[in-house]
Amino acid sequence: MSDFSIVDVLDDDKKISLQNFSENLPMKDTPRTKREIVSKVAFLFGVEDKYFGIGQNENVNPQFYRSVYDEMNLDKEARIVRNLCRIRTKIQRNFKAILIEMTSDIKNLDSMPDLIPQDALKTLEDDGIQFVRARRRLDEYVVDVHNYLLPHVPNCQKFFSDWIKWQYIRNLFFINKGNTTEGNKEAARVYTEFRDLFPYQSFINWEPDESDGNILRDDAKFLPILYEHNRDRFYDMSKVTEAGDAALTSPEEFFAASQRIIIAIDCENADPCKVIGIMKDLEAKGMTEKIAKILLVDDEHTSSQWRALRRSENLPLEYYLTDRVKDEKSAVDVALTIKFYRDIIESKMSGNPVDAAIIVSSDCDFWPLIELTPEVKFLVMLEYDNCSQAYYQRLQNNDVPFFYIDEYFTSGNLELKTEVVLQEVIREIEENHLSKLNLFSVINRALSKIDLKMNETEISQFIEKYIANMTVGFAKNGSAVLQNKPVLKY
C-alpha cells in the first residue's frame, strides 16, 4: 500500500494554513511573545493579506498585526519590496503553468490573473516600476526581481530597531547569484523540493530545515533561528517578549520587597565576574544587610575566580566544595538543592524564617525547588548564553521574578573585572613561578658551576650591590626578561 496524506490533495493556500495551524494556536506554556518583527518581515515577504486579518471574519485571530500592515503599506519602498516578492513567489510556484501560457498562448504576466497577482503589477507601476515588458523571458523576469530589490530593500531598514542585525534580514531577500539565471535555477530547485518548509511558501534566500517549523510564528522564535542560520546567537529575549510581572530590571526591586534573603550560587553555571560584580554593587548600596546567607556550591573543576568573592569579610558566606564520584558527573546541583532547602527549613524552625530566596544559575534543574517551596518567593538570576528557552518560558508563565545578569553587568563594572583578573594573574605568578625561584639557590648554583665560593656576608653585599636593583619585565610575546641589569666590563 502506498503512503497517502490528506495534505497531498490540498491546494497551496490550504497547505500553508495546515502547516502553520498548530503553531498559531494560543499556547498555554509559552511566554507572552511579540509579533512586531515577524509582521514586518511577513509584509515584505509578500505573505497574503488574510494572514493580517484582511478580508477575514473579524472574530478570527490573525497571525500578524494589521497595524503593521497598514503602516508599511503607506510606505512606497515597503510596498515595492512586498509586491516584487509576491510576484517572484508566484512565478516560482506556478513556473510551468506560466511558461506554457507565455510560449503557447503568447501571453505576458499582465494577462494571467489566475497565476500572477495583477494588483501587485498595477501597484508597482503606480510606484514607478514598469515591470512587464514585451518579449521578456520568464527566467529574465526572475532576475529582474532581484535587480529591482537591490536598491529598495535597504530602504526598509528604518522599520527595524538598531538592536537587530539588519544584514541578516536583508540577506533573506537576495538569492545567491540572484542576478544570474543559473543562480535562480538552483534556488528554484531547492524551493520546489522543500517548498512547504519555506515560511508561508515565500520564495526567499533560506536553507530549509524541517525542525524549524513556522519560523514566523513570533519574534521569540524567528530571531534565534535567523541568527543561528547566520552562525550567530540571539541573546536578548527580553526584547522579543512581553515583560509581564515576572521580569525585573535589577535585584534592587526584589530586595526592597523582601525582609530576609538567602542566596544560592551555582558556581558551575554562573559567571564569577558578573556575580561578584552584582554582590559588590549590592554591598556598596548597603543592601546586603537583608542577606541571611550566601551559599556558594562549587565543583573542583570550576573557576578559581570565586576566590575573589570568598575573600569578602562583610558578606555572610558559606562555601561548599563538592568532589566527583565519577569524573564526568558533577554533584553541584544536588548538593546545592539539599543544602539550600535545609537552610530554609532550619531558618523556619529557629523562628527567624527567610521569606525570599535568590538562585544564581541558568540551570533548569532547580525548578522543582522553586515549585515545591511556595512559602518563599524566588528570584532567578540568569545568563543569556546559558539559559534555555524552555526554562525562560517556565519562569515567565509561572510569574517567577528573574533578570539577566548580562544586562546588569555593564561596562561600569570593568574596573571590577580588571581587578579580578589582576588578582588571579598575581596569584599565578607568585604561587606557580616566583615561589619556585630562590635567589640564594641561584647564586649558589652559579658559584658551583664556576668553582668559586662566597661567605654569607659576601653574598649579602653582592645581592645589595648588583641584584637588588634588577626588575622583571615582560616582552611583547609574554616572556619574562631581566631589566636594569648591571653593566659588565668583561
Image (spheres, rainbow, N blue to C red):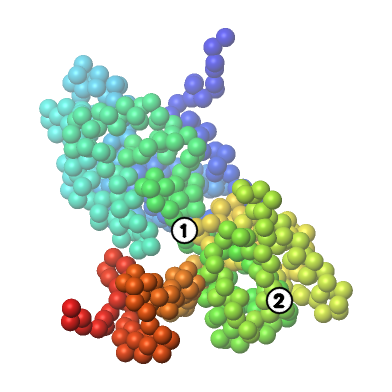
Apparent side of residue 114 relative to residue 428 in the rendered image (left or right): left
Residue 366 appears in the rendering: no
Q: Mark 1 points at which residue?
A: 235
**In-image side of 339 versus 99 (left or right):** right
- Given the image, on which type of amino acid does mark 1 rest? Tyr
Q: Where is residue 394 in the image (x, y as percent from the top left)?
A: 64, 55
Residue 378 visible in the snapshot: yes
Determine which quarter of the picture holds residue 183. top left
Provide residue 320's location: percent of width, then percent of height. 69, 67
Cβ–Cβ below 8 Å for labels 2 and 1? no
Q: Would you call the spot at circle 2 few (<14 residues within 10 Å), some (14-19), or many (20 or more)? A: many
Q: Residue at x 54, y 17 (%)?
A: 4
User: Tag 2: residue type?
Assistant: Lys
Image quarter for residue 296? bottom right
Mark 2 or 1, closer to the camera: 2
Q: Few, some or many C-alpha atoms within 10 Å of disc 1 (few <14, some 14-19, many ≥20)?
A: some
Q: Which mark is residue 293?
A: 2
| Mark 2 → mark 1, Cα distance in angstroms | 31 Å
State which quarter of the image contains the C terminus: bottom left
* Viewer-closest of 362 and 307: 307
Nearer to us in this view, 81 or 349: 349
On-image quarter of the N terminus: top right
Pick the front one: 167 or 412: 412
Mark 2 lies on a secondary structure that is strand
Instruction: Specify which label sits upstream in the sequence, 2 or 1.
Output: 1
Name the secondary structure under disc 1. Answer: loop
